């Protein structure tokens, strides 16, 4: 018998994924429990690539939750639904991977494959997760949210402004996270150019989040056409997977 | 040779079948609904499982209707339901003439339903009535395959029926392809929401395990496989039953190893077919399934004998399946394999032959199919009229999303350049197409799309668009939430010399309405006055008068000149009655009732107006929409003034109209509010589930918060802190801070949960939650200080409750804070929270061991108020406290305490006035303190008891009191407990003894 996908914590993860969180507090709770499980994955444990991404994602979602409690967003209904919908795609990808489904988005499977691998590095791993989540999952999460709220993705609306506020949260959180895990690389980077990875991380999020918004608008227009919608999904998956593989390759590490 | 087609056994799904049966058959009773959605990847056996389960449910006595959704987009509203009905009808025997005529009657509804004044909700209602005629009291099962392609109207119908609004014992069994739910599929969100409901299961169908795979392969081969062969089948198939079956068959027939993938399996099969059979398979793949026999004959142009031979071959090679209504590919996977096997010219030729054949003979889905085939045949000129006809057909069935799709297709077709020897598109006015497409987009909620279509309409012209188009654009902008440009557009109409007075009046009235929603009351009032002036000079502008008057009335009410506002709205009603259409009268009533029960808080009169309005609009034939809304207003008003029995009656009457959409949600919430107050857990749960089902379809965030508040309120009566906390937590993260009343209500529920945790000494207080709730209260206080008068007053009641609950968290509770809260609610004429506040005030006093006479008086008042409402849980809390404090509750209440709510005064039941009066007499006569054996009973229970004494069954009582039979059962058992009797006869005896003279 081959080892289950999630090794010794397989049963726990399957149980956890059976639940579908319905609000942002539940998403945070879910990510927290997931974090506790992922860091127990051998052989890397604390530095499991997925745990690296999950940690970053948890930090950011917790901040979003605080924002919701603190009246930080103009349209909390929209932002809550988006956050829940967004997270659901990550949990879905994990669920599909758990079932060894051939339909696991490739954008995600390139990271999942590395999960147990020996050469994973925290920053590229987290970045690859951010890439899959923002470049692939986010446009669809946006479309579903707008569709559910009977609203539309229009530039310059309250919802668009709330969406952009998340960039500030990312920008706020990423440098500290980076410092948290990157002593060795940091040293090298500082010698080259202290700004590169700031630029790199900051730009990645801001740039891809903007692309995600525009992709959502694109999908929105063809969302009733199953064929066009599927084509769009394949296109985004291919692009995100290509970028993800690049980030995870030795080249990606070198770029940093 | 075709002997083994479709006879492969169902392996490894016994558990799933048991789940399906339990969920869809055993678990449902009369009037209940259930649903199972089976999700899984292609070939995992969803259709097979559906077929098997449907057969078993049919054997168990259910009426089973089976349809499939089509992958040609939102082809036609309600197509799968229509298909299911036709199939069902075809299978009926002559002995079932009555059922058959019911089915045909319903099918005629689809054919004849005329759009226009009638609403989409009316169609849903008619469909559900038709279904209930067909079911004739038997359980009804709706089986829908390929739900990933479901159209929007069918989706709405499903939610409507599952919410119990159709009043049917209905189960839905549907299959959804898992792959399709990735990405942005509209069903994805719906299923996530439904997943949480007790009545809904989402069954994720996985591949077979190794043992199941071996078993299935062995069944097909006829003997267990050799270990290497079995291993190979397992490795290649991954347990997908469809693939296992095909591999095993190849193995049995000695074609082992020829093909590795499904694609190769099918290609080799198609290649092996004789010429005609080959053509038949491709023809079916290009058609819209099921492809009727006559149609296939036309398309293939074969003599009957050869055609039949060809089809037999294709079936024998397991590529096609045939049924009474036509042919299908055995699996959609085959279509995917075949998709790239034809040359473009071959494919276009097939579509042309389809289109030509369909042109000659009208068939099911006629126009949508014609448009589809002509388009793919490369004949835009001939596709265009069909697309337009399909759009109009969809509009007739209120399927605006589908109509929009067809109009868009028509626009594309009209613009397609024509090359070669095909007909050019007929001359169609592009402006008309754009206008129709825009309106359909707007009606299906695609406001941005509607705007861009309008922009196309006017974009080419250097001149300003017409006034009518500008008003249209402003309406779309407002609907899309883009208030600033909408305002500018309305202003431009007002300033334009070329616009008529009528158009300007219209623009001013709509602008006033928009400004009102934005909270700019002064501006709204000014525009409304302008509209009224303009309208005064134009005959027949009653609609504008009503709209503008309402805006003016509300703006005055918010600016604290309520009398002036009220006068304006009253005048509008007179104008409407004198010179307006039915819709104007209905709107005028609606506005007046909303004004009275809303900002003015003149509840009694508001209720009277709403009820009188409801009668009036029913006379005018607008029962479904406006009567329902007016009755919802009356219900909420009656609830607040404490006339719960009456409110329950009104809400039941309103629900008999079988409303749908937002109207239905409002009423279900109103009824649930009553049930929570009564402490009827089961009824509350049922309504909360129904609301959640309706909300799964999306929209209306404004309904989510009331639902969460009720969930929290119910949970607190059940002592379920975790549930209450979760609901409040979710509410806090999903509410806008400017919605002070809802946020205040939510915060109160949260604080109450924490305060009660504190008091219980067994549940820990969640300090983080308390901190957040304090923040929320501060925000409500800050925002409401600057809000308009009526909003502020309303928020103050909840703020008083919050402050008082906080005092419980800080210590034993501050009696003064509770006294202030009670006074707030007394002023607002809301006995329910006022009684609650008195209970807590008494509790705080007693905890300080001081002023026990005041506490006693308060408890008695609270008890009097709560028990005359019928508020069971609140009454029992009061009793518990009184018991602990040894306060005699039945002593004479303080004069003036508890403004003796009129719950019973107007409480004579509509059915059987004589009986109603008896019940009222029984209650009012039941006074002698201490001696009254019925004292423990709530008003509700007394009514039930009176009916029991008349010898009515639970079912009859339920019908008389408009509540479910089961709820009556609960009441009866409470009555037995309280009276300490075991039979209805004993209970009746006590009732008669205490009835008074």
Image (cartoon, rainbow, N blue to C red):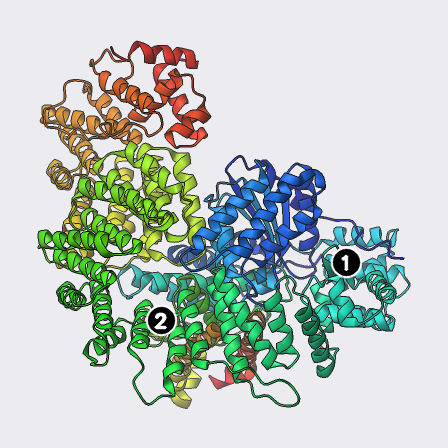
Residue A219: x %, y % from top left: 49, 74
Query: Which residue is at the front of the view, B578 or B778?
Result: B578
Q: Position of residue B39 (x, y in %)?
A: 60, 56
Q: Position of residue A165 (x, y in %)?
A: 32, 72
Left or right of B485, for residue B358: right
Q: Chain of mark 1?
A: B
Q: How many marks?
A: 2
Q: Is residue B263 visible?
A: no
Residue at the image point whose x is 65% and y is 66% from the top = A102
Q: Chain of mark 2?
A: A
Q: Which mark is residue B322?
A: 1
Specify whether A218 is left or right of A161: right
Q: Is residue B975 above or below residue B272?
A: above
* Placement of B418 over or under B974, stated as above or below: below
Specify few, some or many for label 2: CA neighbours under 10 Å numbering under 14, 14-19, or 20 or more. many
Quarter holding the C terminus of chain B is: top left
Task: Give the distance between the C-alpha atoms of the residues marked 1 and 2, in whole angstroms.
Answer: 52 Å
Q: In terms of image quadrants, where is residue B469?
A: bottom left
Q: Nearer the viewer, residue A33 or B304?
A: B304
Quadrant for the N terminus of chain B, please: bottom right
Disc 2, SS: helix
For residue A163, the mark is 2
Q: Is residue B974 left or right of residue B550?
A: right
Above-or-below relation of A96 to B347: above
Q: Say which residue appears at 25% left-offset and 38% top-offset.
A: B638
The correct choice, above or below, for B55 with respect to A121 in the image is above
User: SS class of the residue under badge 1?
Assistant: strand
């Amino acid at each position: 018998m081959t080892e289950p996908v999630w090794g010794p914590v397989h049963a726990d993860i399957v149980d956890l994924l059976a639940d579908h969180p319905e609000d942002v507090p539940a998403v945070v709770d879910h990510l927290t429990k997931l974090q506790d499980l992922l860091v127990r994955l051998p052989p890397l444990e604390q530095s499991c690539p997925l745990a690296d991404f999950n940690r970053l994602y948890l930090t950011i979602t917790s901040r979003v939750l605080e924002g919701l409690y603190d009246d930080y967003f103009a349209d909390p209904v929209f932002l809550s639904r988006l956050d829940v919908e967004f997270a659901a795609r990550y949990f879905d990808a994990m669920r599909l991977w758990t079932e060894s489904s051939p339909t696991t988005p490739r954008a995600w499977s390139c990271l999942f494959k590395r999960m147990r691998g020996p050469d994973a590095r925290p920053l590229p791993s987290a970045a690859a997760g951010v890439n899959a989540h923002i470049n692939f999952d986010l446009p669809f999460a946006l479309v579903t949210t707008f569709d559910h709220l009977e609203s539309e993705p229009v530039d310059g609306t309250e919802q668009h402004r709330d969406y952009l506020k998340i960039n500030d949260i990312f920008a706020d959180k990423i440098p500290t996270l980076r410092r948290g895990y990157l002593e060795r690389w940091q040293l090298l980077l500082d010698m080259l150019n202290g700004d590169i990875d700031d630029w790199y991380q900051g730009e990645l999020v801001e740039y891809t989040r903007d692309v995600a918004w525009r992709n959502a608008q694109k999908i929105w227009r063809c969302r009733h056409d199953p064929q066009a919608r599927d084509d769009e999904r394949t296109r985004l998956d291919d692009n995100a997977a290509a970028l993800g593989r690049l980030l995870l390759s030795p080249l990606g590490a070198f770029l940093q | 040779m075709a002997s083994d087609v479709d006879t492969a056994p169902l392996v490894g799904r016994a558990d799933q079948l048991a789940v399906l049966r339990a969920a869809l058959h055993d678990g449902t009773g009369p009037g209940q609904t259930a649903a199972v959605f089976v999700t899984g990847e292609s070939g995992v056996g969803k259709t097979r499982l559906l077929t098997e389960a449907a057969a078993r449910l049919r054997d168990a006595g259910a009426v089973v209707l089976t349809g499939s959704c089509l992958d040609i987009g939102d082809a036609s509203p309600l197509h799968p339901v229509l298909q299911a009905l036709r199939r069902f009808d075809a299978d009926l025997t002559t002995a079932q003439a009555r059922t058959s005529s019911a089915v045909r009657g319903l099918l005629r509804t689809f054919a004849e339903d005329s759009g226009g004044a009638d609403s989409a909700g009316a169609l849903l209602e008619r469909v559900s009535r038709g279904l209930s005629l067909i079911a004739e009291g038997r359980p009804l099962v709706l089986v829908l395959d390929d739900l990933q392609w479901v159209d929007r109207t069918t989706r709405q119908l499903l939610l409507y029926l599952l919410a119990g609004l159709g009043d049917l014992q209905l189960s839905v069994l549907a299959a959804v392809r898992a792959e399709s739910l990735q990405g942005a599929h509209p069903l994805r969100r719906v299923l996530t929401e439904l997943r949480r409901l007790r009545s809904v299961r989402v069954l994720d169908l996985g591949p077979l395990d190794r043992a199941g795979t071996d078993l299935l392969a062995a069944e097909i081969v006829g003997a267990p496989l050799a270990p290497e062969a079995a291993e190979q089948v397992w490795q290649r198939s991954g347990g997908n039953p469809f693939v296992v079956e095909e591999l095993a068959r190849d193995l049995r027939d000695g074609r082992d190893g020829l093909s590795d993938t499904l694609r190769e399996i099918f290609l080799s099969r198609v290649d092996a077919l004789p010429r005609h059979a080959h053509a038949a398979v491709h023809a079916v793949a290009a058609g819209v399934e099921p492809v009727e026999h006559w149609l296939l004959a036309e398309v293939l142009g074969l003599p009957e004998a050869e055609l039949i031979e060809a089809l037999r071959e294709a079936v024998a090679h397991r590529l096609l399946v045939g049924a009474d209504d036509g042919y299908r590919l055995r699996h959609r996977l085959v279509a995917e394999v075949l998709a790239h096997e034809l040359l473009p010219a071959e494919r276009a030729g097939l579509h042309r032959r389809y289109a030509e054949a369909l042109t000659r003979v009208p068939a099911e889905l006629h126009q949508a199919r014609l448009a589809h085939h002509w388009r793919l045949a490369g004949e835009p000129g001939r596709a265009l009229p069909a697309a337009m006809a399909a759009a109009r057909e969809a509009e007739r069935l209120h399927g605006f999303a589908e109509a929009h799709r067809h109009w868009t297709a028509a626009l594309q077709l009209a613009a397609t350049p024509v090359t070669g020897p095909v007909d050019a598109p007929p001359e169609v006015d592009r402006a008309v197409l754009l206008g129709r497409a825009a309106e359909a987009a707007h009606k299906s909620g695609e406001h941005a799309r509607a705007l861009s279509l309008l922009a196309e309409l006017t974009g080419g012209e250097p001149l300003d668009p017409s006034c009518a188009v500008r008003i249209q654009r402003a309406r779309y902008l407002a609907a899309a939430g883009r208030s600033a440009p909408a305002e500018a557009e309305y202003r431009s109409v007002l300033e334009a010399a070329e616009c008529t007075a009528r158009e300007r009046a219209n623009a001013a009235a709509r602008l006033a309405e928009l400004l009102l929603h934005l909270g700019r009351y002064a501006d709204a009032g000014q525009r409304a006055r302008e509209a009224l002036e303009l309208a005064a000079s134009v005959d027949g502008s009653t609609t504008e008068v009503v709209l503008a008057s309402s805006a003016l009335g509300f703006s005055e009410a918010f600016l604290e000149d309520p009398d002036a506002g009220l006068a304006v709205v009253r005048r509008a009603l007179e104008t409407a009655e004198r010179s307006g259409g039915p819709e104007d009268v209905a709107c005028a009533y609606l506005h007046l009732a909303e004004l009275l029960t809303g900002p003015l808080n003149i509840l009694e009169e508001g209720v009277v107006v709403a009820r009188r309005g409801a009668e009036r609009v029913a006379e005018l034939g607008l029962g479904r929409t406006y009567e329902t809304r007016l009755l919802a207003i009356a219900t909420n008003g009656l609830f607040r003034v404490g006339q719960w029995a009456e409110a329950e009656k009104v809400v039941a009457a309103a629900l008999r109209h079988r409303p749908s959409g937002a109207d239905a949600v409002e009423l279900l919430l109103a009824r649930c509010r009553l049930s929570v107050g009564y402490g009827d857990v089961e009824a509350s749960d049922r309504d909360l589930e129904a609301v959640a089902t309706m909300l799964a379809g999306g929209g209306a965030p404004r309904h989510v918060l009331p639902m969460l508040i009720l969930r929290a309120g119910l949970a607190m009566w059940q002592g379920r802190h975790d549930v209450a906390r979760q609901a409040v937590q979710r509410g806090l993260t999903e509410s806008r801070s400017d919605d002070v009343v809802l946020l205040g209500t939510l915060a109160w529920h949260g604080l109450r949960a924490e305060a009660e945790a504190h008091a219980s000494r067994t549940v820990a207080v969640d300090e983080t939650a308390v901190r957040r709730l304090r923040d929320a209260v501060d925000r409500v206080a800050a925002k409401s200080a600057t809000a308009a008068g009526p909003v502020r007053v309303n928020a103050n009641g909840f703020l008083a409750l919050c402050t008082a609950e906080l005092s419980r968290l800080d210590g034993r509770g501050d009696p003064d804070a509770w006294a202030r809260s009670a006074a707030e609610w007394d002023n607002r004429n809301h006995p329910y929270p006022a009684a609650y506040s008195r209970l807590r005030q008494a509790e705080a006093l007693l905890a300080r061991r001081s002023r026990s006479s005041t506490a006693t008086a308060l408890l008695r008042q609270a008890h009097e108020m709560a028990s005359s409402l019928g508020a069971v849980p609140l009454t029992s809390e009061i009793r518990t406290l009184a018991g602990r404090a040894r306060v005699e509750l039945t002593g004479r209440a303080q004069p003036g305490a508890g403004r003796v709510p009129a719950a019973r005064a107007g409480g004579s039941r509509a059915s059987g006035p004589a009986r109603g009066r008896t019940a009222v007499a029984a209650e009012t006569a039941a006074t002698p303190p201490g001696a009254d054996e019925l004292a423990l009973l709530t008003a509700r229970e007394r009514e039930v008891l009176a009916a029991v004494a008349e010898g009515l069954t639970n079912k009859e009582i339920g019908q008389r009191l408009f509540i479910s039979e089961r709820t009556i059962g609960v009441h009866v058992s409470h009555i037995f407990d309280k009276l300490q009797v075991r039979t209805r006869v004993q209970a009746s005896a006590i009732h008669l003894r205490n009835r008074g003279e």
